[in-house]
Every structure is written in structure tokens, then in C-alpha cells.
Image: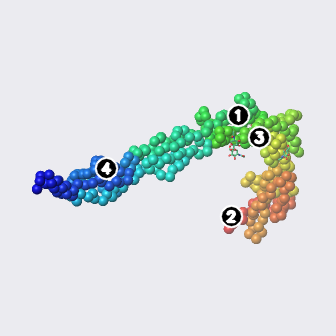
């Protein structure tokens, strides 16, 4: 054999032997790369897959050795996108997203009355962090309510601080004697304007009306302004029923006027009655009658048990009804018979 074919034969043999002793290029795995990239790998050579930036291994092994068979084992590695943590909460706003994984976009919006300060969107980066800081939703600011600085209408802030923001409320007042019409509070609205402001108007009431059997204290003949008041009184023995003070209200009317109520004469000459929980002689105490709304208790007799009980009688604007069970004694019988008021009270018998 000539040497040239021999060498060729030896190369061929060597090649066939070696042919079983190398691994080919390893399989391509989506979203992953192999650390050593070659056309052929020697037996026992190691390769490691790593997931691409932004992806993490979910399952399967990452490290492989070129085996004697020269065939790579089945690679089960799967890479999935990295997750970013929920970027919220966003106070007074909302975060819109479908996924929170690598390359996902989230967007931010603020509720009505709030303005977004910062980035409107943010992206989940390969390192699992968001590309932008969480924005803030800041309250809309309302300018001071449009009242003239020295006008009749002024307002009070209901909370400390220099600025008025969305949903803040101010309370209005009018310089005396003007009356306030409309809502006495206004709110800072979402669009930075104020809800309807009230207004101040001058209101007059006519001269207050006299009451029968009474008088008005310090009533000078003139008109009265809103919130001014007059005080009523009654000539004795008439008494006041209702509030003594009447005020000029917003409608230009006086608040309710009181009435002077008449006293009552008692249509009984002599009797012992109960008055303010004391036994008193009618003839001594009530010569001039009793005042409206006062009450006296008459004694009546329970004949069966020979005891006494009391029945109230109230004076109502000049009228007092003596209870029917009361029996007035004549002058003579008052000398010889026991007064009903001195009998044992019935309630102490049972
Ligand atoms: C007055 O305005 C406030 C808001 O500032 C509102 O809540 C309230 O209902 C209003 N009152 C009336 C009587 O309209
Ligand atoms: C603000 O909103 C209120 C109702 O919400 C509306 O009546 C008013 O006209 C708005 N003002 C401006 C300046 O847009
Ligand atoms: C009545 O008016 C006087 C002075 O105008 C005031 O001092 C007083 O408080 C008022 N009284 C009532 C019950 O409003
Ligand atoms: C108050 O006065 C107005 C007219 O100024 C009248 O229409 C109204 O009925 C009055 N209201 C009362 C409660 O008297």
C-alpha cells in the first residue's frame, strides 16, 4: 500500500472514532443564552444556560455536560419574564395595568380634584424595578373665595393652613346688621372653583306689634334691622306666655310674639287647698285670684273610706274649673265639722 492512501485511511478511521466523541451545537432555548458558543463540544465539556436579562428560570436544569453519546440531553429549561412588585398604592388615584412583568407598562391617573405630579407611566425594567418613581396626586388648590376684602361678606376657614384645597369648606358671615342669603358654607370644587357663594342683604322689620295687656320694652318708633330684638312684658297680674324676646328675622317678619294671659278668680269663698305642696287657706292667699298657668289642688272626700284626696285645677287664661267632687262648706259647718283637708289622705290608707 502506498503511504498516501494509508494516511487517508488512518484519518478516516480517526474521524469515525472521534465522530462519536463530540457534541454538536446545543439546542436553542427561547429567552435564554448559552455561556460558551461553539460548533462542537468535547465530551465532558460543560455549558450553562442563562435566561436573558429580564427573564428568570421557571423550571428545568441550567447546566449540562456533553455526554459520551455525543448528544445533548433534552433541555427543559423555561425562562419567564421577571415580575416587578405592585407599584402602589397611589393615594387619591388609580394604577392601570394588565401585567406587572418585565417590559409591562403601568399608567397612573388621579381622582377628580387631584392633579398628577410626576410621570404618567412607568415600565418594569430587567432588574425588577420600575423605571419611574411613583407619582403623587396632589389636591387641586382653590383661590380664596371671591369676596371683596372689606365687603359685607367675609369667611372663616374651618381648618388651619394658608391654602384652600379640594373639598375644603369655608363659612360665611355678613357684617351686622346685614342678613346672609344662600348657603352659609361653600366648598372648594374639583375644578378649583367655589360652590355658590351666599350674599348679604339689608332686611327691615316693621315696628313690632303691641300685645294686649302688655308692653314692649324700649321700643323706639323706627324700623328694625335683621337680628335686632325687642322684649315684651305684661302688666300684672297678666303673665307672659311664649318667649319674651322677639327677633327681626331674615324674611322681614318678627319671630313669634308672646301673649299676655289673664289671671283667674276662684269661684269658691273658703277652702283649704294645696298650693306649692303647702296647705293654704284660699280666702287668705287668693283674694286676687291666681295667675295664668298656676295650679292649686282641691281636697275632696272619699265618703266610703272617710279619707281625702286631691284634684288639681289649673288657671288657663282666666278660666279655672273647680273639680266637681269639691264641696264648699258653709260658714257654720266650718265651725262644727272637720275640714276635708284634715282627713287622712286616702293614699296612706291602702
Ligand atoms: C351648603 O353647601 C354645602 C357644601 O358646601 C352642602 O353640603 C350643603 O348641602 C349645602 N346646604 C344647603 C342647605 O344647600
Ligand atoms: C366647576 O364645576 C362646577 C360644577 O362641578 C361648575 O358649575 C362650574 O361652572 C365649573 N367652573 C369652571 C370654572 O369650570
Ligand atoms: C337682643 O339684642 C341685644 C342688643 O341688640 C343683644 O345684646 C341681645 O343679646 C339680644 N338678645 C337675644 C335673645 O338675641
Ligand atoms: C314673612 O314675610 C313675607 C313677606 O316679607 C311673607 O311673604 C311671609 O309669609 C312671612 N312669613 C311668615 C312666617 O310670616
In this picture, residue 296 sits left or right of residue 55: right
Between residue 72 and residue 150, name the one nearer to us.
72
Q: Secondary structure at mark 3?
A: strand
> Which residue does the image show at 78% across and 45% down from the upper left?
243
Q: Nearer the viewer, mark 1 or mark 2?
A: 1
Disc 1 or 3, which lies upstream in sequence?
1
User: Which mark sits nearer the N-terminus, 3 or 4?
Assistant: 4
Q: Quadrant of residue 23?
A: bottom left
Decide if residue 33 is in sight here: yes
Query: Residue 168, how many percent across, how many down?
Result: 63, 40
Are circles 3 and 4 on residues that touch, CB within 8 Å? no
Q: 237 above or below 306? A: above
Q: Position of residue 257 (x, y in %)?
A: 83, 45
Q: How far apart are the two marked residues, 1 and 3, measured between alpha carbons?
A: 16 Å
Closest to the camera, between mark 4 and mark 2, is: 4
Circle 1/circle 3 CB separation < 8 Å: no
Q: Quadrant of the C terminus?
A: bottom right
User: How many neighbours does mark 2 have within 10 angstroms: few (below 14), some (14-19), or many (20 or more)?
Assistant: few
Residue assigned mark 2: 348
At numbered mark 4, what does the secondary structure look like: helix, strand or loop? strand
The mark lying in front, picked from 4 and 1, is 4
What is the CA distance from the residue labelled 3 to the residue labelled 4?
81 Å
Amino acid at each position: 500500500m502506498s503511504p498516501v492512501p494509508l494516511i487517508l485511511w488512518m484519518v478516516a478511521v480517526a474521524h469515525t472514532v472521534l465522530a462519536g466523541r463530540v457534541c454538536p451545537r446545543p439546542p436553542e432555548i427561547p429567552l435564554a443564552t448559552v455561556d460558551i458558543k461553539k460548533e462542537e463540544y468535547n465530551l465532558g465539556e460543560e455549558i450553562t444556560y442563562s435566561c436573558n436579562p429580564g427573564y428568570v428560570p421557571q423550571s428545568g436544569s441550567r447546566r449540562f455536560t456533553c455526554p459520551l453519546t455525543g448528544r445533548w440531553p433534552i433541555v427543559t429549561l423555561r425562562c419567564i419574564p421577571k415580575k416587578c412588585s405592585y407599584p402602589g398604592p397611589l393615594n387619591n388615584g388609580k394604577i392601570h395595568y394588565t401585567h406587572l412583568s418585565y417590559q409591562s407598562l403601568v399608567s397612573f391617573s388621579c381622582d377628580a380634584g387631584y392633579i398628577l405630579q410626576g410621570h404618567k407611566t412607568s415600565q418594569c425594567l430587567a432588574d425588577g424595578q420600575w423605571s419611574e418613581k411613583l407619582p403623587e396626586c396632589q389636591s387641586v388648590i382653590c383661590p380664596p373665595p371671591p369676596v371683596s376684602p372689606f365687603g359685607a361678606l367675609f369667611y372663616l376657614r374651618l381648618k388651619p393652613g394658608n391654602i384652600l384645597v379640594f373639598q375644603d369648606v369655608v363659612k360665611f358671615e355678613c357684617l351686622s346688621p346685614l342678613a346672609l342669603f344662600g348657603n352659609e358654607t361653600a366648598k372648594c370644587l374639583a375644578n378649583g372653583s367655589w360652590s355658590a357663594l351666599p350674599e348679604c342683604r339689608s332686611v327691615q322689620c316693621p315696628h313690632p306689634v303691641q300685645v294686649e295687656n302688655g308692653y314692649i320694652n324700649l321700643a323706639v318708633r323706627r324700623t328694625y334691622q335683621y337680628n335686632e330684638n325687642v322684649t315684651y312684658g305684661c302688666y300684672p297680674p297678666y303673665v307672659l306666655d311664649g318667649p319674651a324676646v322677639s327677633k327681626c328675622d331674615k324674611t322681614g317678619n318678627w319671630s313669634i310674639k308672646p301673649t299676655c294671659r289673664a289671671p283667674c278668680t276662684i269661684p269658691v269663698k273658703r277652702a283649704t287647698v294645696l298650693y306649692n305642696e303647702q296647705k293654704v287657706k284660699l280666702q287668705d292667699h287668693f283674694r286676687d285670684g291666681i295667675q295664668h298657668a298656676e295650679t292649686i289642688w282641691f281636697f275632696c272626700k272619699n265618703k266610703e273610706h272617710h279619707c281625702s284626696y286631691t284634684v288639681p285645677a289649673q288657671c288657663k287664661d282666666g278660666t279655672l274649673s273647680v273639680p266637681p267632687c269639691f264641696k264648699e262648706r258653709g260658714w257654720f259647718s266650718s265651725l262644727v265639722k272637720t275640714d276635708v283637708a284634715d282627713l287622712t289622705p286616702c293614699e296612706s290608707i291602702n
